[in-house]
Amino acid sequence: MSAPIVTTEHLSKWYGQVSGLNDVTVAVPPGITGLLGPNGAGKSTFLKLITGQLKPSKGTVTVLGQPIWDNPGAYFKIGFCPEQDSFYERMTGLAWVTALVRLNGYDEAEAAAAAEKAIAAVDLLDAKDKKIGAYSKGMRQRIKMAQALVHDPGLLILDEPLTGMDPLMRRRTIKLIKDWARQGKSIIVSSHILHEVESMTSNILLINNGRILAEGNVHQIRDLIDTHPHTVFVRAEQPRAFARHCLAYDDVLSLRFESGAVVVQTGKPDAFYARMTSLAATDEVGLIHEVTSPDDNLQAVFQYLVK
Amino acid sequence: MTSATAESTPSAVPPAIPKARRAPSLWRAAVLIFDLSLARMLWSRGTIFMALLVGLPVVLAVLVRGVQAIGGPDMQVDGKVITGPTIFGFMVWWLYLRFIVPVLALYYGTALVADEVEDKTITYLFTRPIARGAVLLGKFLAYFVCTAMVVTPSLMIVYFLMGLSGATLAGTFPSLLKDLGLVILGLLAYGGLFAWVGAQFKRPLLIGLVFVFGFEQLALIIPGYIRNLTVSYYLQSLVPHAVMGEGVLSLLQSLVQQKASLPVAVGMLVFIGAAFVFLAMRVIARREYVLEQ
């Protein structure tokens, strides 16, 4: 069996009196691993600890065989795509990614070439010379991913990378992540949406209240999630047209309108997402701008698991 | 969804033979951070504040020259006419060195890393193979160049409006160079100090304001060595027109006036700047930043 890419032993992190992560011992294998948990579960804390942004309050972290805290050399092999939507807004995508990869020891020409390649990989070449401030949410997510992979790291750590993407870009990004894994990269990807994680990998870490509840095969819990109604928030150009389509689906339990959006409850999230992706490819309901899933679906499962 | 309608697969990064890379040296990394930060600093939310600050003496100088040009009365103190160069000297000390330089240093110095933390962009810099200290050093260099680029033209404009009157450029040019050097030394020393204050403390602005407008003012009029703990003492030692103000404060200052020698004053200002930047780099290297979710 291959050596684990990330190992933690009794890892804990406190923010003052508040526990962010509690006594986590885990060995993450190579390949794609999904870190699944509701908002506030400790996913971001875990990712910040394994990317050396936070110092453990207790316990140890080893990434690719090296300690990560205060070890800048380790970042040659790690690419991190953070959750926060923060950028140097006045820079173009190309200039920003180029500037960042220069910090990895690339000279100017190499950096520009690597940045262009990474931007092409996330399908953003057309917008490379636009200022990031003018990017859509999905484009911003993709340029964040470009800066993470620009130095061709062996380990990619992606914090909620699909947030804000439209259904088709989601599918393309998931495929991209799987392609990277096939090329030998290891990827840790966090999400609060089981459906997303499941489409990338069957290997998951379930996290809640700062503890790892389970690790292993996602299929063992997928049945659980299907027994709970799944809420999907869809911001669409024509929400009423979209809702009309939804009403024809047996698995749609309820729907309500919000400003420019439809909030749907479905009993079969897999089938719903698949149909929505197909629908988005047609012009029948106009553009689908954003699809998000509030974490209450997963929360329900966690409540069930920890009972 | 326009570009997403085609179902073509996005091109994945082709496998490449990884090239062994060396991390940039501390200085090289700092220069790269400087490149990344300079434009951002020049066009930040503080730009208007900075423009107002350095524009203030220019406006005052234009007003004084305007009054003189329309035949207004000369400024007099104790019956003596205050000439343009005297007003210029007064402005260099009281406006530039005692107000604009410390305030700019406080505003930018304390925010060197805080701005990146607040904007949550620090993650991109701290997950690269460079020493964290290089981030602070690069941003300090950006602060230094950015403020020097703005303050020195302001000082030169005021000099041409006020300081030159009745004298030749050749005759007073060395004095102008000295004043420019003083401003630069002030930006260095105060900037370094406040970079450390910003890295070390939770309320850096408050601490900085108390230091500049409380402690330093007081220390300069108290006899003894406490003044050696201020930046303004070393700056004042280099300014011939430092105590030409009127009033009780200036009188007290003149009574206890002491000066450091030129080499000591210059050396101490450079040392203060460098030492506090070094300390700030150490703090940044050890500190963790918890970004608000």
Image (spheres, rainbow, N blue to C red):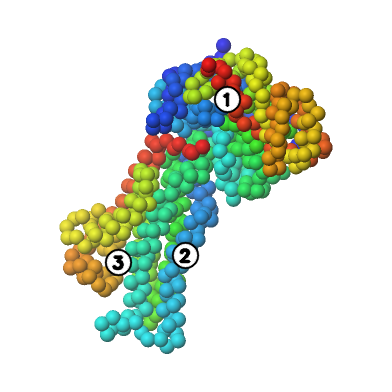
Callout 3: SS: loop
- Whether labels 2 and 1 belong to a single chain: the reply is no
Above or below: residue B191 compared with residue B282? below
- Residue drawn at (72%, 26%), measured in percent from left and top? A253
Q: Mark 2 and mark 3 in contact (Cβ < 8 Å)?
A: no
Q: CA distance from mark 3 to mark 2?
A: 25 Å
> Is A101 situated above or below A171?
below
Q: Nearer the viewer, mark 2 or mark 1?
A: 1
Outermost residue on the bottom side: it is: B71
Instruction: Please state if B89 lies on the left or on the right of B128 as rendered.
Output: left
Rendering coords of residue A58 (x, y %): 39, 24
Chain for numbered disc 3: B
Question: Do the CB atoms of the residues marked 2 and 1 lie less than 8 Å apart?
Answer: no
The residue positioned farthest toward the top in the image shown: A1
Gap between marks 1 and 3, in whole Å? 67 Å
Foreground residue, A156 or B3?
Answer: B3
In the depicted view, which residue is nearer to us: A164 or A129?
A164
The amino acid on which the numbered mark 3 sits, given as a three-letter code, is Val
Could you tell me the amino acid type at mark 1? Gln
> Alpha carbon of mark 2 to alpha carbon of mark 1: how far?
52 Å
* Quadrant of the frame with the N terminus of chain B: top right
Q: Disc 2 marks which residue?
A: B52
Residue receiving disc 1: A299
> In the picture shown, does residue B43 fall above or below B73?
above
Instruction: Choose top left, top right, bottom left or bottom right for residue A206.
Output: top right
Residue A160 picture location, percent across and down: 60, 31
